[in-house]
Amino acid sequence: MVGVVGLEVHAQIQSRSKLFSGSHVKFMAPPNSLVSHFDASLPGTLPAGYQITQQRLPIAVDGTLVYCQFEGRKRNQVLTRSVRIKQIQLEQDSGKSLHDDERSQTLIDLNRAGVGLMELVMEPDMCCGEEAAAAIRELQLILQALGTCQANMAEGQLRVDANVSVHRPGDPLGVRTEVKNINSVRHLAKAIDYEIQRQMEVLQSGGTVLNETRSFDSRSGFMPEPNLPPLYVYESDACVPADVDPAQVVVIDRIRAQVPELPPARRLRLVETYGILLEHSFTLVNEDGLMNYFESVVQMTKAEPRKVIGWVMKELMGNLNLQGMKVAQSPISPHALAELINLVESGHVSSSAAKQVFQEMWKVPEKKARQIVKELDLGMINDRKELWRICQGVVERYPEEVQIIRAGNMKVLNKLMGEVQRETKGRTDPVQVRAILEDMTL
Amino acid sequence: MRLTHPRCKVRELPALRTFTSARRTSWSRWIHERHSSTSTPESKVPKMPTWESIAESQLPPPTKVSPDLVDKLERLALVDFGSKEGVDCLEKAIRFADQLHVVNTDGVEPMDSVLEDRALYLRADAVTEGECAEELLTLAKNTIEEYFVAPPGNIPLPQREESPAHSEL
């Protein structure tokens, strides 16, 4: 049996004011402070809060969301998938109610009432939690790039309901249940997989899956909205009638010109411009501020972008993830990292010693790379006589290994190189050391 | 569609005159605010409401709402009409709507909105109202701190085994 997953997404439209009133849209404000008489459906005539479902046509139909998923043991195989978007509708958010069971009453805050929502209905083209999570992650990035939604699930700006069912491939779809109220992409994946597993177990043990949600299905009922005149959409400014204020209408050409670089185009540009791996372009685009950080470092250093990406992915992201920090919180600025990479490029410090310098800079951000190299004596040993002396010492201490190398097993040379690295705290150039050791042993 | 405060809504509808004039006041204030805060050339809202009285004799016989129908409506809407008074309100509301029967619609295409010959327009995304929680809360019957207080969401309805409405749910 396989799982079948469809998603219904409500994305809060990022705006200063509400859809049909001039009240402020803000997260975390005192209850009922962002409410006008209209939002409170006063003077008691409008049943506010119901869905403004389009009467004739949804805002958009028959779309596709292309997203990528990583597979394989190292999660570096990129699979491109797509999910059909049935329609996008415009809705108004409802108020928030807090249930006080003890005193059997409901407390109502209308701050959210009337805030514009985009409802996206995705077809059941996904088969597991991971696919749904990848699709939602891509949607978040697109909405954030467009600036139409902040798409933070924990703050309720993006709410995802999943319709989950299981069936044998080729059979009609099974009875579906809803997974609701999930506050992160990771939990979405887990909740969907749990529900698929649960349904499979129910069916395998001879039971039946029951659909317990009896709520009104917004997709089946279209409620005419008599208070809204039709919305006309114009192809270009030239199409707008003379008696209409051009600032008060929707003109497709004008919007098209404002659409910024979207995530897929951004990734492609990063791969093509800098010659980095596709999987790295995903991380650069996914992490807020990381792409700018990377591009700043590239501009300030002579090093190849492929080397810079290593520092950004391993050292920077490694430290940030370990401490649960965001890119903007990094104690090491792009400029400071560029200085460090330049020291490696100019041969002042080996790349392994530079990693120690990086950790020290993380702890003491006010110190410059050059200063730390000096204080910790991590500068590269470039003096050929000294290198020769150190290698000589190692060769004398490992006579057996030298014999094996002489017998033709060059792999053992790596052990001697490791010894030199340890003795010099990584302050040597591996290419130089290898050449000297080869000279001595062969 | 969710009816949030139907009882309140039903009760206000028959009082057509007072409510219309109240709305007129709020509309004219709104027009005034638009003029002062934006460069909208003219309001899209008519300045004056118009109406005419309909004589009782022109209307069809009044509708009576049976207890079974009330029961069904209560279950569908998850709202308790409560009393005889609630049912009276509902009947009055239906009576009010009966006036629509008098309108001559010969040769008029059915439409969902009387605004179909108008166009929806965009306004500037600017904050122009709100910050009046205190004023709004004084209008509510029950409040706690800055919240409105409503009855619990799902009102437990008594089971009416004999009711046909129950089995349909």
Image (cartoon, rainbow, N blue to C red):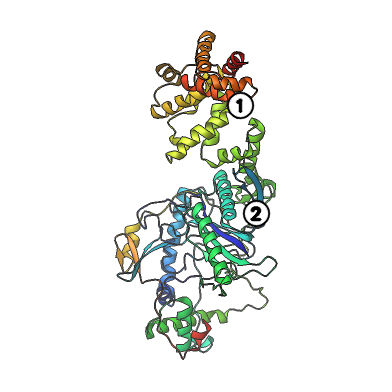
In percent of width and height, residue B69 lies at 48, 86
For this rendering, which residue is in front, A291 or B87? A291
* Residue A354 position (above or below residue A55): above
Which quadrant does the N terminus of chain A fall into? Answer: bottom right
The residue positioned farthest toward the top in the image shown = A385
Of the 4 image quadrants, the one containing the C terminus of chain A is top right
Residue in view at x 56 percent, y 60 percent = A8
Decide which of A237, B86 is in the foreground and name it.
B86
Q: Quadrant of residue A306?
A: top right
Question: Is residue A19 something that shows in the picture?
Answer: no
Q: Residue at left 60%, top 54%? A: A131
| Residue A164 percent across, percent down from the top left | 57, 64
Badge 1 and badge 2 in a common chain: yes
* Residue B38 horizontal side relative to residue B104, left or right: left
Give the residue pinned by disc 2.
A233
Give the residue type that dot 2 points to: Val
* Whether residue A26 is visible: yes
Which dot marks residue A440? none
Horizontally, is A371 left or right of A242 in the view? Answer: left
Residue at image coords 66%, 74% = B108
Estimate the x, y position of residue A230 in percent, counting from the top left.
61, 61
Q: Check the residue under mark 2 and report the chain it is in.
A: A
Picture disc at residue A411? 1
Find numbered disc 1 in the image and state the secondary structure of the residue it sits on. Answer: helix
Identify residue type, mark 1: Lys
